[in-house]
Amino acid sequence: MITNILDQQGREQSGWELIQQETPIEVLATTPGGWIQFRDPITRQCLNAINGVALTKGTCDLKNRESLFVLIPSTTGAVQIQSVNSKTCVIDQDNTDHFYLVVVLLISRTHNK
């Protein structure tokens, strides 16, 4: 579990910063939002998807791509967070504050005009 510093009411004192990263043009064609990193503003560490099975704080090094994610919009206004490196998505475990990675089948609809 990744823990953040809490205040006296149990709320996080600092959240994650979303850092936009340079994204190849061919990626922008399918993911207009591009690549992002989630960075802890206190430790300066980034969220990492390790081998597509675990989430942890770690290096923000762009070479290994474990800290790169894309936000996939939905029709409800929510987004799916997908690891660039492993293509797995972040999901929360019901009734807990735990998050984990799973393979999610994303179905794209195209409309003929």
Image (tube, grey):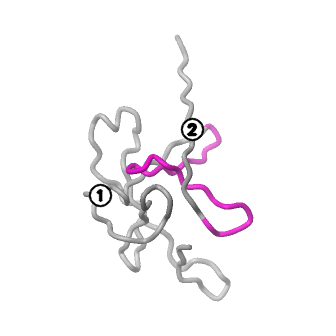
Residue 33 position by quadrant: top left
Give the crowd class for mark 2: few <14, some 14-19, many >=20 residues within 10 Å.
Answer: few
Give the crowd class for mark 1: few <14, some 14-19, many >=20 residues within 10 Å.
Answer: few
Q: Secondary structure at mark 1?
A: loop
Q: What's the CA distance linking mark 2 and mark 1? A: 24 Å
Residue 23 percent location from the top left of the image: 29, 45
Residue 77, magenta (yes or no): yes
Front residue of 112/85: it is 85
Q: Which residue is mark 2?
A: 105
Q: Secondary structure at mark 2?
A: loop
Q: Is residue 4 left or right of residue 10?
A: left
Residue 64, which numbered label? Answer: 1
Residue 53 percent location from the top left of the image: 50, 58
- What residue lies at 30% left-to-right and 34% top-to-bottom? 26
Q: Which residues are magenta?
A: 75-98
Front residue of 6/89: it is 89
**Where, quadrant-wise, is the N terminus in this rendering?**
bottom right
Q: Main secondary structure of the magenta part?
A: loop
Looking at the image, residue 71 lies above or below residue 2: above
- What residue lies at 53% left-to-right and 21% top-to-bottom? 110
Amino acid bearing label 1: Asn
Residue 44, magenta (yes or no): no
Q: Is residue 53 left or right of residue 78?
A: left
